[in-house]
Image: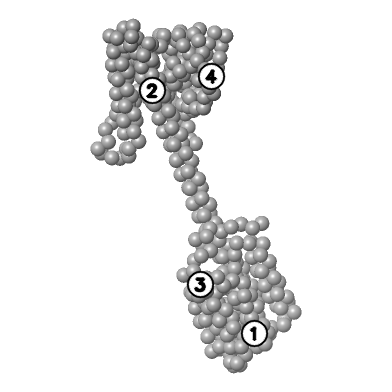
Amino acid sequence: MRIEAPQWVLDQRAMRPVFAGLVSIIAIGAFVTRDDEVVSWVMLGPTVALFWVWALSWRFPAWPALLMGLYIPITLNLIESDAEVSMFIAVIAIAITAAYSTNRTYVRGVVGSWIFVMVTLGVVEAMDDFAWPNWLFGALFAWGAGEMIWRFAHTVGELAHTRSLVADQAALQERRRIARDVHDLVGHSLSVVMLHITGARHLVHKDPHEAERALIQAEEAGRQSLAEIRRTVGLLRDETDPSAPALPSADLTDVPELVADFAAAGLLVTSELHGKVHLVDPATALAGYRIVQEALTNASRHTLDAQVTVAVSIIDDACEIVVANRGGETIDLGRGSGFGLISMRERAKSVGGSLLAGPTKDGWTVEATLPVEAVRRVR
């Protein structure tokens, strides 16, 4: 199986001259300790040259130098028995092959064939006074060291890739959270403002004073929504910024005020709170508030003259939220994006709760069940 090593390991070009330098030193040592200098340079000279070409040329493949480094020392020792120093070149070649090759099957094949040749030569005693068991051990050690280097680099690469995926996922979750907040805030503010403006349009000729009051309320709703949008944007600032103000978040105790805003805009809506809603976890309370806000926004957009009830109850360790539309006329605005329902479900899920929404015989109902203590989910 072909496994890709991380690119930063495969391109450690600064190490190539080091390897070529070691090969050169070993070749000089083999030349000094041999009697037949001509044979030494004929055999080792091209090997050293190939290693330097590989070291200095980024595009030159490694296999010619490694092939020479693996088998020229054996050939040299077959000719004369006093060239064991050159075997260090083969050890270096094995370490480079194991540490840098992306094809692990190729690595095992190369090292296995080299070991087979060594064992065969040792068994048939083709090389007199040649300590082949020592070089066999050296080859295995170099292979193991190269494997450790490659596996370490491969693990580092996988960790870097995983870190990148986690960062991307965190960024995606943050974009979704911001999208939910912007959708809820803008949708709510526009719905309330449009309700007031619609009422003013119908009253402008019949009751100018009432129409003016509706426009004033629309202006106030717009200013409040703008302030809330600014507050939400402020929450996106770096929490470590000492200049960032600690701004409170909306919670379930603010539901009556939210309902009053919609009622003032003309929506027929009432609310009931049962239990100690002020003790609900802040994350759950904010999620519940946003669910109610989105449900009322949908009711104001898609129904006319419907009776809407909002009920928030604390039952045991659960917070039950029910927003029900009864009666009224359905307004056909075309097929929506469905983002509102997705947003409500995501908010419920984010604190470990659940949400059901759908039509009933006489309207539409949104039911959310949230834990009093929010569940911190690890994504």
* Residue at figure coordinates x 56%, y 81% from the top left: 49
Amino acid type at circle 1 is: Leu
User: Residue 190 bears which disc, if any?
Assistant: 2
Label 2 – label 3 distance at C-alpha: 65 Å
Label 4 – label 3 distance at C-alpha: 64 Å
User: Residue 31 bears which disc, if any?
Assistant: none
Residue 240 shown left or right of residue 93 in the figure: left
Q: Nearer the viewer, mark 1 or mark 3?
A: 3
Q: Residues within 10 Å of mark 4 (few under 14, many from 20)?
A: some
User: Residue 16 bears which disc, if any?
Assistant: 3
Instruction: Tell me the element at label 1.
Output: helix
Label 2 – label 1 distance at C-alpha: 87 Å
For this orientation, the residue located farthest to the right is: 124
Q: Nearer the viewer, mark 2 or mark 3?
A: 2
Specify the quadrant of the image occupied by residue 126.
Answer: bottom right
Residue 124 shown left or right of residue 271 in the figure: right
Q: Is residue 19 visible?
A: no
Amino acid type at circle 4 is: Leu
User: Residue 356 bears which disc, if any?
Assistant: 4
Instruction: Tell me the element at label 3.
Output: helix
